[in-house]
Image: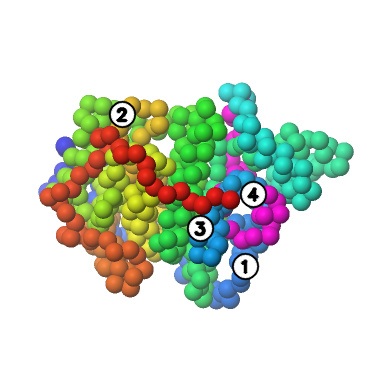
Amino acid sequence: MNIVTTLKDGTVIYRNPFTETEAWFLPERKYRPSHANHNNIKKPLKLEEPQNYCAFCPTHYFETTPEKSRIERYNGDWQLVDAPTPQHIFSNTAEFRRIGNLYEIISHSYWTENFNFQLTPDQKKHKEAYLSDPQGREHIRSLLAQKRHAAHQDIFSDSNDKWIDQLSDAFFAGAHELIIPRRHFSDAATDEAHLCSAGELTPEEHFQYLRLSCHATKSVYNNNPYVKYVGVYTNWRRDAGASFEHLHRQIIGVDRIGHQIQNGTRLAARDHKIYQNYIKYVAFDLGFVLCENEHAIALVDVGHTFSSIAVYSKSAQTLPWRKSQEELQSMSDIIHAIHAAFGAEESLNEEWYYQPPHSNVRIPWYVLIRWRNHRHAGIENITDIFPDEYGPVDLKNILLGKMVKLKNEHKITDLFLDNECDAANFKLNYYEKPEPNSGKSIKTT
C-alpha cells in the first residue's frame, strides 16, 4: 500500500485508500497563529436542575418534536419506551431522547414527493394517538406555528386547524432524527465551559446513548424502504457544525451511498482482507495504535481532511444494531474513552461507517472521530492537499497521556493502551460469517 511518503524537508504525505485523500503533515505550520476553538471567557455558572439552557434541555420538551423513543432509568435499570404518550413525555425526565429533527436536512416531503413514501401503520397509529390527546395536539400546533414563523408565513389560526393533521407527518415519519442526552452541562459544572460532551458521560451512560442510536438507525431502515443508507454522525460544538452546544447525535436516511463507503466496498470486493491488512499496517507496523479491548481497536488514522482517530469493530457482525451487547459495549467503551481524552472543549465530528444492509460485500463497522482543531486554508479543493500541523505521532502522544490519567482515575474502562495491544493476534473478523446475535435488549415499556 502506498500510504506514507516522507520528503527530504520533513514533510510527510499520508494517503488513505478508502478516502483517497492526501493529508500533508507540515511541522512548521504548528508555529503559525491559529484559530482557537475555545472560548476563553468562562462565565460562572450556578447549575439548575432540571437543566434549562437550550431547546434540547429537559425543561423545553414542548420546543422539540414528539419523541419516537426514550430511555429512562428505574431503580437502576435502563428501560426503552417506544412511542411515549404526551402525558408520559411531559411528566417524566428521559436520560436519552429520540426525536425527529424539526429542521430536517432531507425533508419528509423529499420522500413523499419523489418516492411517494407513505407512513407505516405504526407511524399512523402513533400520530393519531398523539393528535387525539389535547396536550399532544397543542404541542404539534405550537411546533407548526414555530416553523411557519421561521419561514415568515402566517401562523395557524383556529380556522385552519385541519392542516395540523396533514403537516405533522414529518414529526412521526421523517428520516432525520436526533438522539439527545439529558444534560447540557456536566454535573460538576462551575462555569459555562463545562459542557456535557460524550466523554463527560459515564461509560454506562455512553453505552445507552450508543444503543439508542443503533435502535434509531435500524428503525429508519425499517420504516422507509427508499432509504439506501442511514448516516450517523455527531457535530460536537459550533466549530464542528452544531447549532446547539448540547450533545446530540444525528441519524439521517439518504437515497445514496457516500464515496468512502462505495470505495471501501469496491476495494473489499477485490480483496476481502483489505481492511484487516490496512489496520494492521497502520496500527502496528507504523505504530499508530492507541488502545484496544476484546471486540474493538482504536488507532490514529491517516489520510483524512482533519486529524482523525478510527475505532474499528473486530466483530464478524458488520451492522451496528445487530451486534451482541458485549460487542457493542466494547465499541462504546473505546469511543467514550477517545472523547474523554479529547475533552469537552475540543470540536469534534463523530462519523459511523458500516456495510450497506443490501450489499453482499462485507466491510467492518468503524467510527471516525475527527479533530476540528483548525479551519481549512482554502487550498484544499484546488489541490486535493489537506495540510495539518499535527502528525499521527503528535496526536497519539497527546491522547495517550490523557488516557493513562483517565484510566488511573477510573473515568474510562480498563483498556489495553499502546504497546499493551496484541499485535501478534490482532484480527478483524468482518469477512467471516457472524455468530447469531445473543445480546440482551433494553427493557421495553
Which stretch is magenta? 85-112
Residue 165 position within the rendered picture, expressed as x and y whole percent measured from the top left: 75, 36
N-terminal of the pair, mark 4 or mark 1, is 1
Q: Is residue 180 visible to the viewer in this orientation of the structure?
A: no
| Residue 50 badge | 1
N-terminal of the pair, mark 2 or mark 4, is 4
- Crowding at dot 2, Cα within 10 Å, few <14 / some 14-19 / many 20+, comes out as some
Count of numbered tags: 4
- Crowding at dot 1, Cα within 10 Å, few <14 / some 14-19 / many 20+, comes out as few
N-terminal of the pair, mark 1 or mark 2, is 1
Kindly report the distance in space between the C-alpha atoms of the residues bearing marks 4 and 3.
Answer: 15 Å
Kindly report the distance in space between the C-alpha atoms of the residues bearing marks 1 and 2.
Answer: 47 Å
Q: What residue type is labelled 3?
A: Trp
Kindly report the distance in space between the C-alpha atoms of the residues bearing marks 4 and 1.
Answer: 20 Å
Q: In this view, does 282 lie above or below 74?
A: above
Q: What residue type is labelled 1?
A: Pro
Disc 3 marks which residue?
Answer: 78
Residue 31 position within the rendered picture, expressed as x and y whole percent measured from the top left: 28, 61
Disc 4 marks which residue?
Answer: 84
Disc 2 marks which residue?
Answer: 361
Based on the picture, tell me whether residue 95 belongs to the magenta stretch: yes
